[in-house]
Amino acid sequence: MMFAPRRFPALFRTLATTLLAVGVSAGATAAEPRPVALVEFASFDCQFCQAMSDHHPAIEAAVEDAELEYRYAPLPSHTSLERAWRERTYYASREIPGIAEEVREAFLAAGKTGVPLENLDEVLAHLELHVPQVRWNQFSEDRIQDRSSVEAIERAIRLAQRAELREYPAFAVVSRSGVELLSLAGDVDEKAEAVIKYLENL
């Protein structure tokens, strides 16, 4: 799936020389020192991103072996940021230890099976079924509907622009001096294998 920055023109007019995005610092120059994090840009609506979820355990294991941080950065494809409830929920859920991965997989699975999650009520109902250990209605009032969940998407979009993102899924490495998009070719399986080999060679 192609990334369409024109959907967020106001966010792309000004890029700070230092970005705080998806919990990782990114500076203004190309990433040359050893990376500190791997960021996966994706869309919950992208069939290739849904297929990449099969490789998440292996990728995350390779990230851990490389002693990096892993950040999943979903971006909305067909709605305004304020109405991007899946993405807002995902970023908010990172405040709960161990929950964000389950939320991510629940949303990707919904995309695979065609489950519509077009509004907040549908999102919460889906999570009540698939991630029942959280009181989602209360969490929604406290965190999901808070402006901070929109700001998290905005930071991810700025980092994607900095990396010159053009398609999903994509992987970028972040160092203390900048962010660099990995050049990956082939199908989903080949891209996942290339990411793992890159991490093994660090």
Image (spheres, helix red, strand yellow):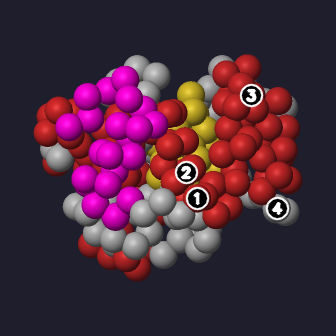
Q: Are marks 3 and 1 in contact (CB under 8 Å)?
A: no
Q: Is residue 112 visible?
A: yes
SS type, badge 3: helix
Query: Which image quarter is the N terminus in?
Result: bottom right
- Which numbered mark, 3 or 1, is in the foreground of this view? 1
Please tell me in which quadrant of the rendered image residue 173 appears.
top right
Residue at mark 3: 62
Q: Amino acid at mark 3?
A: Ala
Residue at mark 2: 108
SS type, badge 1: helix
Residue 160 in picture, x, y percent from top left = 49, 58
SS type, badge 4: loop
Instruction: Tell whether 61 sits left or right of 11.
Output: right
Residue at mark 1: 113
Q: Residue at coordinates 39% horizontally, 46% vertically from top-left?
A: 126
What span is colored magenta in the figure? 117-137
Tell me the CA gap for discs 2 and 3: 21 Å
Among the two numbered marks 4 and 2 on one chain, the one whose residue lies closer to the N terminus: 2
Chief SS of the magenta region = helix
Residue 193 in picture, x, y percent from top left = 84, 44
Q: Residues within 10 Å of mark 4 (few under 14, many from 20)?
A: few
Query: Which image quarter is the C terminus in?
Result: top right
Instruction: Tell whether 49 sits left or right of 126.
Output: right
Among the two numbered marks 1 and 4 on one chain, the one whose residue lies closer to the N terminus: 1
| Vertical side of 20 occupied by 79: above or below | below
- Which numbered mark, 2 or 3, is in the foreground of this view? 2
| Vertical side of 160 occupied by 96: above or below | above
Pick the residue in front: 3 or 20: 3
Numbered disc total: 4
